[in-house]
Amino acid sequence: MAKLKALEFFSGIGGMHAALKVAAPDAEVACAYDINEVANDVYQANFGRRPRQGNLAAVSPASMDKHAADLWLLAPPCQPFTRQGLKKDIDDGRASCFMQLLQNMKTLKHPPVFLLLENVVGFEKSAVHAALMETLKEQSFSVQEFILTPTQLGIPYSRPR
């Protein structure tokens, strides 16, 4: 099998990148994207290269296609879905970039084969989740969803995701 190539969206400080390196040491993150300058500073310190900084809505399908990534790593903003937040869901502006990525996926010449997405409890009941499921169905993805907490993996931190 060829080396797994990933795009990392909403990369933050690189938690998904770090997990990928443990799960698939030969995998390559071809490009990472995040809007937060401080998170990008930490990502660069962690991985030796800086994510592309800016609004994901400005990332064109052509620029995604050029990487021909097999895997998308996604950790979109959780505030639209948190139990203690305003629960604005799809009407929260922070969800718009994720919705744009779903639209872009439908137009790619080289769409991903795998998606790995992390978010909070509540996301699974959202309109954004419903749009994700519809997009994945249209693209003939098989879907497996889990709600996990780090304590299930031996990490002393109870935060279901």
Image (cartoon, rainbow, N blue to C red):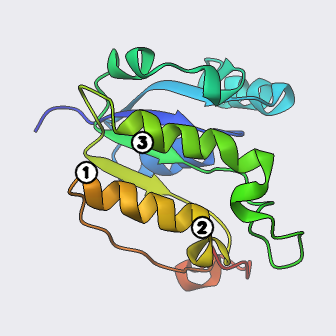
Identify residue type, mark 3: Trp
Above-or-below relation of 82 to 110 = below
Rounded to the nearest angstrom, the CA distance separating label 3 from label 1 is: 14 Å
Write down the residue under mark 1.
139
Q: To which quarter of the image does residue 45 belong? A: top right
Residue 146: x and y in percent read 46, 78
The image quadrant where one finds the N terminus is top left
Mark with earlier residue (3, 2): 3
Is residue 40 visible in the rendered image? The answer is yes
Three-letter amino acid code at disc 2? Ala
Q: Is residue 10 visible?
A: no
| Residue that carries the numbered disc 3 in the rendered image | 72
Residue furthest out toward the left: 1
Q: Residues within 10 Å of mark 3 (few under 14, many from 20)?
A: many
Q: Residue at x 89, y 70 (%)?
A: 85
Count neighbours of disc 2 (C-alpha within 10 A) and say few if under 14, some if 14 to 19, many if 20 or more. some
* Labels in figure, total: 3
> At label 1, which amino acid type do we have?
Gln
The local crowd at label 1, few if under 14, some if 14 to 19, many if 20 or more residues have their Cα within 10 Å, is: some
- Circles 3 and 1: CB atoms closer than 8 Å: no
Q: Secondary structure at mark 2?
A: helix
Q: Earlier in the sequence, mark 3 or mark 1?
A: 3
Q: Position of residue 131 (x, y in %)?
A: 49, 60
Q: What secondary structure is marked by label 1?
A: loop
Residue 133, percent across and down? 41, 65
Task: Say which residue label 2 marks.
Answer: 127
Which is nearer the N-term, disc 1 or disc 2?
Answer: 2
In this image, 129 relative to 67: left or right? Answer: right
